[in-house]
Image (cartoon, helix red, strand yellow):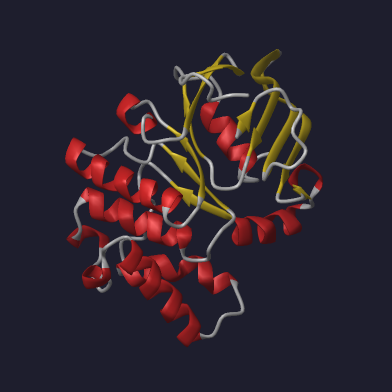
Amino acid sequence: MVRVDGKSENSLVKVRGVDKVYRRGSEDIHVLQGLNLDVDAGDFVAFMGPSGSGKTTLLNLLGGLDLPTRGTITVAGDEITSMSGTKLTAWRARHVGFVFQMYNLIPVMTAFQNVELPLLLTNLSKAQRRSHVETALEVVGLSDRMNHSPNQLSGGQEQRVGIARAIVADPTFLLCDEPTGDLDRKSADEVLNLLDRLSKEFKKTILMVTHDPLAATRADVTLHMDKGVLIDGAREGAIA
């Protein structure tokens, strides 16, 4: 269940009264305004809205990449808005899997090495890391491409490597920022099928920003943002 009234106490993700204000010269730019949001474990949520509506800013706040001007964000019982930078870095490595529009793969590394990167921050042995990476690449259907470099892969395959990297440490949730924005329809559908499988089969909690209405239909709930405010849900009964 997804709520935007801030009244749930048992949700995996709890956003309470969040504002985000940027200073531009003498002007205050209010990007998010009084945001409340609750997301339960296993929910697949899509955020839609015009450019500049605050979607990516919200994703960055949820992932601990930025801090709100006011309000609190709690994930799995951890209030990330009060953490020090060091604690937040460790929390992010353990709990957040990021999927970006432009893949952000390192071109001189193989698919295997790119997926392994998050695990280098853990205490796993080399053998344990290999096992995790092989499992993640199997899940995304690229076991036979693990020794290929990004320039030997199609865009859709690169994005699937990006998803394997996001899930390799078994994070609490996935944050996907326009994951199909740079793909053709066929490759986009393959990536969306994978996200759908991660949600339904592996019970992953996924929060996805998208401009693509077809991508949004894959989510359990679609929320619309406008001028920093969550304004409604795209499906009847989607929001309690």
Q: In this view, does 53 lie above or below 125?
A: above
| Res 215 seen here | yes
| Res 69 seen here | no
Residue 95 point in image, percent of width and height: 61, 57
Residue 24 point in image, percent of width and height: 64, 19
Residue 145 is left or right of residue 65, and the answer is: left
Which residue is situated farthest in the front direction here?
237
Q: Nearer the viewer, residue 126 or 44?
A: 44
Residue shown at 65% from the left, 16% from the top: 29
Quadrant in which residue 112 is drawn: bottom left
Residue shown at 37% from the left, 51% from the top: 197
Quadrant, the N terminus? top right
Quadrant, the C terminus? top right
Q: In this view, does 140 lie above or below 218?
A: below
Q: How many labels does the image show?
A: 0
Q: Which of 85 and 97 is in front in this view?
A: 97
Residue 220 point in image, percent of width and height: 46, 34
Residue 52 is left or right of residue 24, and the answer is: left
Residue shown at 59% from the left, 55% from the top: 172
Which residue is situated farthest in the right direction here?
82
Quadrant in which residue 123 is drawn: bottom right
Residue 179 point in image, percent of width and height: 37, 41
Q: Which of 191 and 18 is in front in this view?
A: 191
